[in-house]
Image: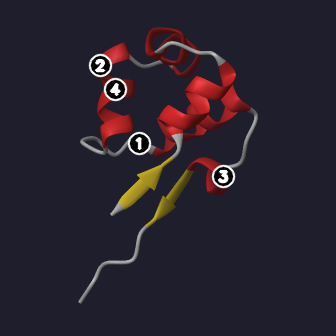
Amino acid sequence: MMKNKVKELRARYGYSQETLGKEAGATRQTIAAIEKGDYVPSLLLALNICRAFSLTMEEVFWLEEEKK
């Protein structure tokens, strides 16, 4: 399962969901879904989100190990 720090980072940077969406080329609803873990962004969208925060992919997104 993919995890992320988008909500935490957005708050730290003072971005609204709409502002981050505009920066990354997505809608507010898409950003909300990513934050809740309901939507896994495409590679391009994930890179654009990272660029908006000036962070690497690993600092924003990671894979959580599946429990067997």
Q: Say few, some or many: other residues with alpha carbon within 10 Å of mark 4 (under 14 / 14 to 19 / 20 or more).
A: some
Question: How far is disc 1 from disc 4 in space, using C-alphas?
Answer: 15 Å
The amino acid marked with disc number 3 is Glu
Q: Say few, some or many: other residues with alpha carbon within 10 Å of mark 3 (under 14 / 14 to 19 / 20 or more).
A: some
The residue pinned by badge 1 equals 42
| Residue 18 to residue 1: above or below | above
Q: Which mark sits nearer the N-terminus, 2 or 1?
A: 2
The residue pinned by badge 4 equals 32
Question: How far is disc 2 from disc 1 in space, using C-alphas?
Answer: 15 Å
Question: How far is disc 2 from disc 3 in space, using C-alphas?
Answer: 22 Å
Residue 56, image x and y in percent?
A: 71, 48
The amino acid marked with disc number 1 is Ser
Residue 24, image x and y in percent?
A: 54, 22
Q: Say few, some or many: other residues with alpha carbon within 10 Å of mark 2 (under 14 / 14 to 19 / 20 or more).
A: few
| Residue 40 to residue 51: above or below | below
Residue 47, image x and y in percent?
A: 59, 39
The residue pinned by badge 2 equals 29
- Secondary element under disc 4, as helix, strand or loop, is helix
- Secondary element under disc 3, as helix, strand or loop, is helix
| Residue at the image point whose x is 73% and y is 41% from the top | 55
The residue positioned farthest toward the right in the image shown: 54
The residue pinned by badge 3 equals 59
